[in-house]
Image: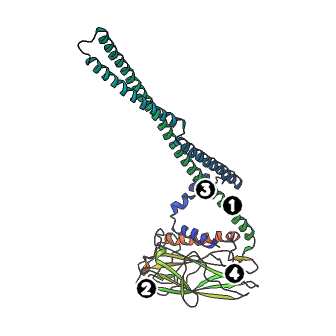
Amino acid sequence: MKIRRILATAVAAAVTTPVLLLSAAPAFADAKSAAQTQEKPSIAELEKAAAAAQTAYDAAVAAEAAAEAELEAILSDTAPLAVAAKAAATAAADAATAKTAADQAVVDAKAELAALPGTATDEEKAAATTKVTEAETAAVAADEAKTAADAALVEANDARDDERVAAVRKLGQAQKATEDALAAKTAADEALAKAKEEAAEEGEEGEEEGDCVPEAKLTTVVTGLPSVVVAGKKVDFKLRVTNGTDKTMDEVFPFAYVHATDKSGLKDLDELVRLQWSNGSKWKTVDNEHYMDAISPLKAGAHADVKMRLTIDASAPAGNGVTFVAGDYWNDNGTCGGTPDLEGYEFLIAAAGTDPGKVDDAKPGKTEPNNSNLTPQTGTSAAPTGSLAATGTSSAVSQAALAAGAAVAIGAGAVFVVRRRKAGSHA
């Protein structure tokens, strides 16, 4: 049951919140209200979104598979552009061979013309000259054919390579789309699962909340905690838990929370304050988050005392502190409840080496040490005097008193949202 520590944290915040910020709280709340009141999507809406995400993911997977198959086909030697490129390569090779042959024919024709004897007739000379001319013409044609074939080969290779690059890019885009679709699907599934889990928890809590009731006759009282605690000293006191009802409580869990500030009320000193309780064999630290061990059982009209110890580090400055206590019970039959309020016991923190003299025990509400060297801090104009002049301003103590009052004001209704814990879990 987390309600106790939630309340204690809220009250502690009140101790350290300046009056100016407190006065600005309504405006701040108004500024946040629009965002806070935005409705969460329903489970039906989340289910629809998850189904859409699944459909998109399935489509992306199919598109990726198609792109991969398309690339495999395009890379094949039987792909149309691959076949065309191969044919263009053959044609270019044939054109090159033809050009070589034509060039050689020109060489042969010229050699033949040059080899004619001086006795050659005019007809023989004319025939040889004509052969040279025809060979040269054929060589020019062969060269043009080779140039055209080479250009066709370049074009065919470019077309084939462009198609392959486009297919690789398409597959990469498909893979990225699948990755994005999977991320969206995962997020949608997680959102749906979380919403269902929260709905289930709310359903369980709704069933459980009705059994938990405020019980004013379950009381928690602190005794022996001085109203002034000197830094560097250990203070032992007791927390008495009393079952004032006429029925046995099967398990009663004491709860305590300690909070401290410097004399301005603005600087948190919690790290310098240590609250412990004893289970009879060893001391355990109160971590402001969990209950102490259960008192099992606490019979009707009976009480139990829990040994407590408060230690303030010697380096702590003068300031103010408050210890909140409460108790909650759980019965084997499933019923539960607790003290309606968080009881706050305020104390002053005196700097190390200070001698406060004789002081009264801390009382719920206003702390007024019974010491001739101290002026009771009862209003905003009061100021401490004497050896404890450094313990803090009255405004800081007033804030602590205000916080204690807040605990009383909100505590009565808080028990109705108490969540009954499952067996073995009381945190």
Nearest-to-viewer mark from 4 and 3: 3
N-term-proximal mark, 4 vs 3: 3
Which residue is under mark 1? 196
Which residue is under mark 2? 355
Mark 3 falls on what kind of element?
Answer: helix
Which residue is under mark 4? 218
N-term-proximal mark, 2 vs 4: 4
Query: Residue at coordinates 34% horizontally, 16% vertically from top-left?
Result: 131
Query: Residue at coordinates 57% horizontally, 70% vertically from top-left?
Result: 9
Q: Residue furthest bottom?
A: 281
Residue type for callout 2? Asp
As displayed, is residue 147 above or below residue 25? above
| Image position of 338 (left or right of 313) | right
Which residue is under mark 3? 186
Q: CA distance from mark 4 to mark 1?
A: 37 Å
Residue type for callout 1? Lys
Closer-to-camera residue (69/343)? 69
Determine crowd level at label 3: few under 14, some 14-19, many 20+ residues with C-alpha closer than 10 A: some
Nearest-to-viewer mark from 2 and 4: 4
